[in-house]
Amino acid sequence: MMALLFAAAALWALAWVFGVPMRVRLVVLGVVWLAIVAAHLLLPAEIPFRVNTGGDARPWLVLAILALAVWGYRALLARLRNRAHAKAPAQPDTAPKPVFTDTELTRYARHMMLREVGGPGQRALKQAKVLVIGAGGLGSPALLYLAAAGVGTIGVIDDDTVDGTNLQRQIIHTDARIGMPKVFSAQAQMQALNPFVTVQPYNRRLTEAEAEQLFAQYDLILDGTDNFDTRYLTNRIAVQCSKPLIAAAITQWEGQIALYDPARGGPCFECLFPERPAPGLVPSCAEAGVIAPLPGVLGSMMAVEALKTLTHAGASLRGALVIYDGLYGESRRMTTHARADCPVCHGKGATA
């Protein structure tokens, strides 16, 4: 009998090595057991098979009872364990989640190599919210580079639609999207470039009624508009909400850019330009024309200044105005100051 048990154990081990399923192994052993018990019950006692397998069916019946007892005990333990797990309250996942996926780490690797940005700076960009006013010539490169750089939430507000005359310089739009609202065209291009950022499109003109509530949702405002009504409105609400404002303007071959942030030092836009220019003195791009790459230069400078502001890298354009002349390849930087008689910021930037 012992020899047969050892043989059964060896057969079990061999079947396990070859990956035979548990159910198949149990069925085989059950068939062998039934054959042995049947032989003891039906065959004469002097048959060699009965003699070699113990001569009696009772030991095999006891073995079956012991096996069933072990199986029943394990099944009971498993049932109790499952019931305990079902009643136990779910434990909150307290393990910190990574800020960046592996794909994002690869995407932003060149940023993280910069001493002035690194991991903390890139994290600040991902957590930042930037609102861009205007999805035209200046907004196009600014929006694309903000998205490419990994700014987490980017809002864009504009009430215009894509026109064929825009495509000479507004590189965020395409010929296939002529007639589409610019904010949705910009959103499609930005998310195609970087699916890890969130784009909030506002298909309307910025108005006094909603400006304050909208600005309050963002950390930084970029003004790429081409009309003075919106520029003065944007400056006034940005000062009221203590939001830094990066504004640029272009015409023909020239452009200018500055960071207006009285809450943290320096003037506001109206400190430098207290009065609107006389009609015709500063013609629009539609009236005077503009060289195609010029908004790309100034819009890219806006994006650079935005990333510096959000990561606190380098020296900002707070309290400075940069003028770029593309026709003669010259740039000038002028220091600016807040005016105590400014009706918007009241010279706050002079003492901030």
Image (tube, rainbow, N blue to C red):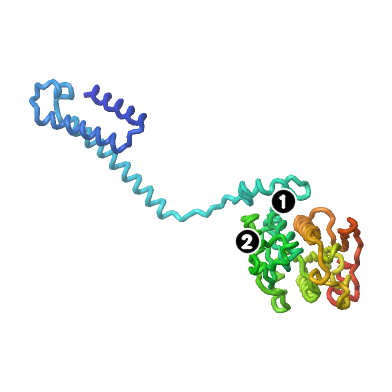
Q: Percent position (x, y) of residue 27? A: 25, 36
Q: Name the residue nearer the viewer: 131 or 45.
A: 131
Q: Which is nearer the N-term, disc 1 or disc 2? A: 1
Tell me: 243 left or right of 343: left
Q: Percent position (x, y) of residue 154? A: 68, 62
Q: Name the residue nearer the viewer: 307 or 167.
A: 167
Q: Amino acid at mark 1?
A: Pro
Instruction: Give above or below for 157 relative to 11.
Output: below
**From the image, which quarter does the N terminus lie in?**
top left
> What residue sits 77% from the left and 74% below the top?
230
Circle 2 sits in a helix, a strand or a loop, which is it? Answer: helix
Residue 91 visible? The answer is: yes
Q: Quadrant of residue 212?
A: bottom right
Disc number for residue 120 = 1
Disc number for residue 62 = none
State how far apart marks 1 and 2 are (Cα): 28 Å
> What residue sits 31% from the left and 45% below the top?
76
Q: Percent position (x, y) of residue 15? A: 32, 30
User: Which residue in the protein does label 2 denote?
Assistant: 188
